[in-house]
Image (cartoon, rainbow, N blue to C red):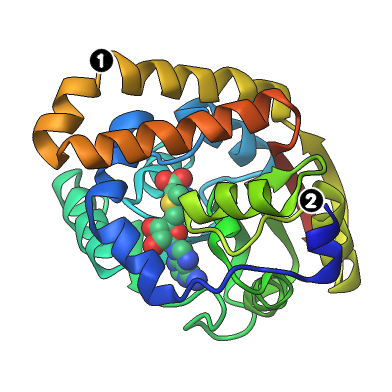
Amino acid sequence: MNEIIKGKHLDFTIAEVNEVYAGAVGQLWEMLMGEEIHVGGVRETDILAEKAGLNRNTTVLDVCSALGGPARHLAQTYGCRVTGLDATVKMVDEAVRRTELEGLSDLVSFRIGNALDMPFHAGTFDVVWGQDAWCYITDKEKLVREARRVLRSGGMIAFTDWIQTGNMNDKEWEDLNTFMAFPYMETLDGYEKLLSENGFIIGEKEDLSNDFVHHCHLYQDKLRNELKDVVISGFGKELYKAADEGLDKWVRAVDDGKVGRGRIIGKKER
Ligand SMILES: C[S@@+](CC[C@H](N)C(=O)[O-])C[C@H]1O[C@@H](n2cnc3c(N)ncnc32)[C@H](O)[C@@H]1O
């Protein structure tokens, strides 16, 4: 926890994150979680959508939209217009392809770009949305400021993210973040502070770490059983071993209450 207070973070560049998601690791995440690359799948997307009050008149910006699974689900289910923003060209290309295939391109579109310098005018969206991705962002205060800028007055910010929930030594902190290519994880209180200090009123703040424990064990079982041979034959023994070892460290940290997941809903102050 001290590391966050001191502002320590690992030096991952956007190019390194792009490499992760353009390569085998991006594919592995989809195999583990599905095309909605976050914990809890469609069910979690619906919970967030209801809390954010989405309907057919809402314009949503999904920041770090990856394959666009949630964007398509939101458009299909709530009739809203969704723009996905992601920095990895391969993810955006694939998101566009799948969206065309599903006939949703009139409601869902994608832009390549950095969440820290969003390519949109001020006041464009009703909702800024994020699922389990802002842990990759190197400057979360700047992200929150960008979210505020592109939101209309009274607009909502609604997101889930992987968070730090307990103390750990420097080595463990570095191992866990390095395995995921996270510069650092926020705490739930840290996010609340960032939002309150940057023009948002917090509506809800929920620690979802118990559910996260359950899901991390499911992902570990899936990797060790159902996916083991597929991953080894597709990507090689080395990658399987690295994935298994890294995930195991995460599962232990999750069990020990050191890392978890949270959900926050906020409203842009007028
Ligand atoms: C875990 S995936 C997101 C999953 C997605 N939210 C979903 O629920 O399906 C992380 C994504 O964040 C993107 N990303 C990471 N850092 C970014 C940044 N600074 N700007 C834009 N996209 C970024 C990656 O390219 C990757 O596609």
**Residue 216 shows in the view:** yes
Mark 2, ligand 1, within 8 Å: the answer is: no
Q: Which residue is drawn at 60% across and 45% down?
A: 54
Query: Which one is nearer the viewer's eye here, 227 or 197?
Result: 227
Above or below, 155 relative to 51: below
Element assignment for label 1: loop
Instruction: Kindly identify the amino acid type of the residue bearing the numbered disc 2.
Output: Thr
Element assignment for label 2: loop
Query: Which one is nearer the viewer's eye here, 204 or 24?
Result: 24
Query: Which one is nearer the viewer's eye here, 201 or 38?
Result: 38
Q: Please indicate whether residue 67 sits to the left or right of residue 77 in the image.
A: left
How busy is the neighbourhood of tag 2: few (under 14 within 10 Å), some, or many (20 plus)? many
Q: Name the residue under label 1.
A: 226
**Residue 212 shows in the view:** no
Q: Please indicate whether residue 171 sits to the left or right of residue 216 in the image.
A: right
Quadrant hosting residue 37? top left
Where is residue 131 shown, x and y percent of the image?
Answer: 55, 47
